[in-house]
Image (cartoon, helix red, strand yellow):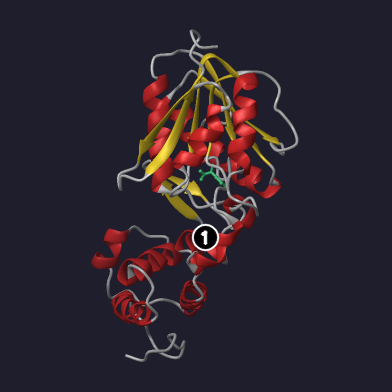
Amino acid sequence: MPRNIPVIDRVWTILDLIRWGAEYFRDKEIDSPRLTIELMICHVLDIQRVQLYTDFERPLTREELANLRAMVLRRKDHEPLQYILGQADFYGRPFIVTPDVLIPRPETELLVDRVIRGAKGQGSIRCLDIGTGSGCIPVTAAIHLPESHWLAIDISKGALDVATRNAERHGVADRVELQQCDILKEQPAGTFDIITMNPPYIAAADISELEPEVRDHEPHQALTDDADGLTFFRRLAVLASVMLRPGGTMFIEIGHGQSELVRSILASAAMKTEIIPDLAMVPRIAIVRNSPSMS
Ligand code: GLN
């Protein structure tokens, strides 16, 4: 089997391509080599994974092969697989992703899980998601909290387009309103029972350390504040007291090693702050409560 990209002058079956692709991606030190080529073939042929093995002798047409080749080349250049497939899983559901949005992360599933568990049974609530990106937070929460209404804001028009498509795809577009807003300069109207944000918390100095998938392909302004990584926490500390309703809660994702800094920044909001760890025991979600007794 040749090591280079498949040439289009011979017949390639599904099985040939799985074998070739797994080897090729392993050679290039791409994560999950076999899964990667399998998901690409499924995407090109528009089939489920199980069909790869029931239809393994199916030959690909020249056009299918050309499409697959383009995907393989993108992944070789470290473009994340989710952008190539146009989709990422979040909290058990598929979300449309493009290079305009951050790829949703498992850590953010923990944030959403907290929101859902914390708000179950609260009835009709008004919520705000800041820097919504793909819309994974408000769309997932709206599905699980059928009486919740969300305002989801982002500075990026491209991100808002993706979030709109995700809200429509998951049938919650009537309860997730999208709005362009620069939270550092503007303040959305009204007050909220829940505010969520997964801020661009990577410090400018740490950007070069990131893996190429993230550094070279995910949107820069979704990753970093181009400063010390804490800009948005400072802004949220100011906004919490004006935008959280009495009894309301803010859920903020934080970066590795930021918990004490974030805690002291949020202390200025004079609200009760709890920081909970993720599955790797890294402090990950700051929960800020505007308890009526303390306000
Ligand atoms: N809210 C989106 C997410 O959690 C985008 C966050 C961001 O762009 N920083 O995936």
* Residue 276 picture quarter: top left
Which percent across, then down, holds residue 282?
Answer: 35, 46
Residue 71 visible within the image: yes
- Closest to the observer, 83 or 290: 290
Q: Quadrant of the C terminus?
A: top right
- In the image, residue 24 sits, relative to residue 145, either above or below, namely below
Q: Residue at x 44, y 85 (%)?
A: 5
- The residue to which callout 1 is attached is 83
The quadrant where ligand 1 appears is top right
Q: Residues within 10 Å of mark 1 (few under 14, many from 20)?
A: many
Residue 170 seen in render = no
**24 with respect to 193 (left or right):** left
Q: Is residue 53 above or below residue 86?
A: below
Q: Is residue 128 above or below residue 211?
A: above
The x and y percentages for residue 132 are: 58, 40
Left or right, residue 275 beside residue 238: left
83, 131: nearer the viewer: 131
